[in-house]
Image: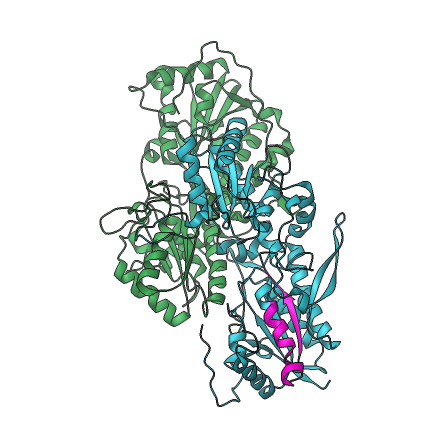
Chain colours: A cyan, B green
């Protein structure tokens, strides 16, 4: 294959380490200038490809690109946008080809979660379906840790570490206050339908009585009576109770707690508030004073407390994606393969996008204790290595120094504009 | 003064560095064994003194005491309990004296905020009023930064750093997502009636356009129209808007936002939700998709991202308190004195408890911009040194290693029990 340019885009919710993958892609491509010309990034993900809004990453220095490794979120902008099937929206694919042809793009790197790898898979087939030769490699990323085949997903380890550290710290706080004040602390975390992030909170509990004493998973329908019993037992035994609740927890009727009739000051249904619902439930039945926190974006942006394992793996899958592309491997995604738990050893593997697209990996039931309120030893063995190691960003004047790239646009070559409905 | 034992207690809301002050007290006392015998800590603060529930800190090793320096929250338990005046509850003071006499306590160290220093002040006068000789020294602590005389309060710098780091990180996230998804991010922070913590978020904005674009202070009544204009301008100019809102923000009628009619699923007034109220206000008027976070205890327990300046100062005031006591100084509190801004230099000073008790320090109006939505250069100059430096705790298996002391009780010597209503 002659020298071609590469396209790289970030997709879906960003993470503390998706830029480390970008760093891996760009640094590796720069080492292969004989094969890969420019690396163009899509401004706001795939939207940038469709609207011919490409960023010339070559305009940023080696130092700036290296700083991506310690910078959270998506340096080029991400997008929540899923390509439809070829039959449903052929125009989008034709436009993609037009843009790629105009800019001599032969490599397509797509950094995202399940939906995004579905898009990667579709793009990987346009050579066969529409006659435009492309090598498309997906790069795994999702805090939800729900991609199949790969042992874990870059982005997850750092959220996991943030949640475990945060619940440990907040529990020390509530334990101090419990005698005369707050006895219940509830931390709400992300994860949608999968309890991986909530489970990570369980790592903070290393011995009997350690916080969190209760974890509420989206996989387990809330049993209010059992929850109240367990909370009360914890307060009576340890003086307090620290709880991690997944945003996706549902009640017995299958309704999200966060939507269970809560109204805000304007009368709108209030979303994203599973923590206050749980706190208030406990207060109204047991009378204990509570505090609650909703970490929201703080958890997935918390590069300051990123897991070194996660940063290393995020970089490695970016690097591996370019190496796979250079070997001519189309329609694949690098994966993390676990070689052993203790000591933790991992390597890079390869999955076919066809096997990744639209498959969700759920928490195995045997990762959750029988009573449904905590994690098992098996789960702990799986999760623990993923939060290991610290990888602090540089600081100046007390603040982490994250890079903002120049993001200089590549001159447009096409006359036609393309409208994307976002 | 002959050899006496010392009493130390933590009071009020705990912080990431109050244990660093405890470490300063205990380590310094251990260096003066000729003058200070045991250091007894009150289990759950002053409650421990009243109920004769004393902890013998001598039972913990030098390594365990040293680890207090990097451990958040109150290692001996804190209490929200304010001693009444001598006239109103003479029995409490008589009991205190009884306990102190029984345990040969001649030094009384009280580590807390405004209310607590009022208690210190009352205790400092029992020599004169009730004839029990005591040297009482207050030790400043409060995340709210509202103690007078001292340039700043230990505990505040670390919360300030957490808030500045967190809003910077979350803003990187929302900026990445803004094209197709979230455009508004609202972070709710502590601080009650004082905007110090919210102001600290402003440190993340180092140049025009940097997040946070908007700060809402409790000192400035919310002007919804102006807020909406400003948010809209930020979204149109930068693509998104990151907002720090103090839990204590009030509307034009003087009502807390967090209480402004919000009802939860159980029909109870919902507290601690200024962030969702602001987010929903913006959504309903401007239509922008939002995310919000409530950091709550996470912010004041976040020892993992503590300010080195803050840790050093917290230790220093603990050490200074013992040194003042050894000089026979009763009814005083060590303070932080700022010697210069650039380079930042500070020293330990002394204030009289009579001047500290029940005086609140508010944010000067000229620390807030005229429009009421950000901090001024003057404020930045004041705040910036307080978040400088990192002081990471040790980690094992990816988790910070915080110490839990043995907290072995001193055998009781009194027969009478004392009931404390908490």
Q: Is residue A273 above or below residue A50?
A: above
Whether residue A408 is visible, yes or no, is: no
**Image x and y of residue A154, in percent:** 63, 60
Q: Left or right? Give the position of A162 relative to A388.
A: left
Q: How many marks?
A: 0
Q: Is residue A26 above or below residue B218?
A: below
Who's the residue at 35% across and 56% down the image?
B280
Q: Is residue A4 above or below residue A264?
A: below
Residue B280 located within the stretch drawn in magenta: no
The magenta-colored residue range is A117-142
**Image x and y of residue B8, in percent:** 49, 27
Q: Quadrant of the N terminus of chain A?
A: bottom right
Who's the residue at 44% across and 34% down the image?
A182
Who's the residue at 59% across and 71% down the image?
A119
Residue A119 located within the stretch drawn in magenta: yes
**Image x and y of residue B141, in percent:** 44, 38
**Image x and y of residue A352, in percent:** 70, 68
Q: Left or right? Give the position of A138 relative to B282.
A: right
Q: Quadrant of residue A143?
A: bottom right
Who's the residue at 65% across and 77% down the image?
A125
Q: Is residue A208 above or below residue A77?
A: above
Q: Quadrant of the C terminus of chain A?
A: bottom left
Residues B316 and A19: in front is A19
């Amino acid at each position: 294959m002659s020298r071609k340019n590469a396209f790289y885009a970030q997709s879906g919710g960003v993470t503390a380490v998706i830029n480390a993958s970008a760093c891996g892609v760009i640094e590796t491509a720069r080492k292969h200038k004989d094969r890969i010309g420019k690396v163009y990034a899509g401004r706001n993900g795939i939207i940038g490809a469709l609207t011919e809004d490409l960023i010339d990453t070559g305009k940023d220095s080696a130092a700036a690109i290296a700083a991506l490794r310690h910078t959270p979120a998506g340096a080029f902008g991400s997008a929540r946008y899923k390509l439809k099937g070829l039959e449903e929206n052929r125009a989008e694919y034709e436009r993609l080809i037009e843009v790629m042809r105009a800019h001599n793009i032969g490599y397509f790197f797509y950094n995202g979660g399940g939906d995004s790898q579905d898009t990667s898979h579709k793009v990987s087939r346009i050579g066969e379906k529409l006659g435009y030769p492309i090598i498309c490699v997906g790069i795994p990323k999702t805090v939800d840790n729900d991609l199949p085949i790969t042992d874990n997903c870059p982005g997850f380890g750092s959220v996991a570490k943030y949640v475990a550290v945060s619940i440990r710290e907040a529990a020390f706080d509530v334990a101090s206050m419990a005698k005369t004040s707050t006895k219940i602390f509830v931390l709400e975390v992300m994860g949608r339908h999968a309890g991986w992030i909530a489970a990570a909170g369980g790592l903070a509990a290393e011995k009997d009585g350690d916080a969190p004493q209760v974890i509420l998973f989206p996989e387990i329908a809330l049993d209010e009576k059992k929850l109240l019993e367990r909370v009360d037992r914890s307060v009576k035994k340890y003086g307090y109770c620290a709880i991690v609740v997944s945003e996706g927890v549902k009640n017995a009727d299958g309704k999200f707690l966060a939507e269970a009739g809560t109204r805000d000051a304007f009368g709108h249904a209030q979303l994203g508030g599973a923590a206050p619902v749980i706190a208030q439930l406990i207060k109204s039945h047991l009378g204990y004073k509570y505090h609650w926190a909703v970490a929201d974006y703080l958890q997935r942006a918390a590069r300051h407390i990123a897991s070194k394992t996660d940063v290393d793996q995020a970089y490695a899958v970016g690097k591996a994606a370019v190496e796979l592309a250079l070997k001519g491997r189309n329609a694949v995604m690098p994966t993390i393969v676990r070689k052993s738990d203790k000591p933790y050893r991992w390597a890079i593997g390869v999955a076919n996008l066809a096997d990744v697209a639209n498959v969700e990996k759920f928490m195995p039931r045997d990762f959750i204790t029988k009573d449904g309120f905590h994690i098992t030893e098996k789960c702990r063995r799986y999760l623990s290595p993923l939060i290991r190691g610290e990888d602090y960003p540089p600081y100046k004047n007390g603040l982490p120094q994250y890079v903002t790239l120049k993001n200089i646009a590549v001159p447009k070559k096409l006359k036609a504009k393309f409208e994307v409905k976002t």
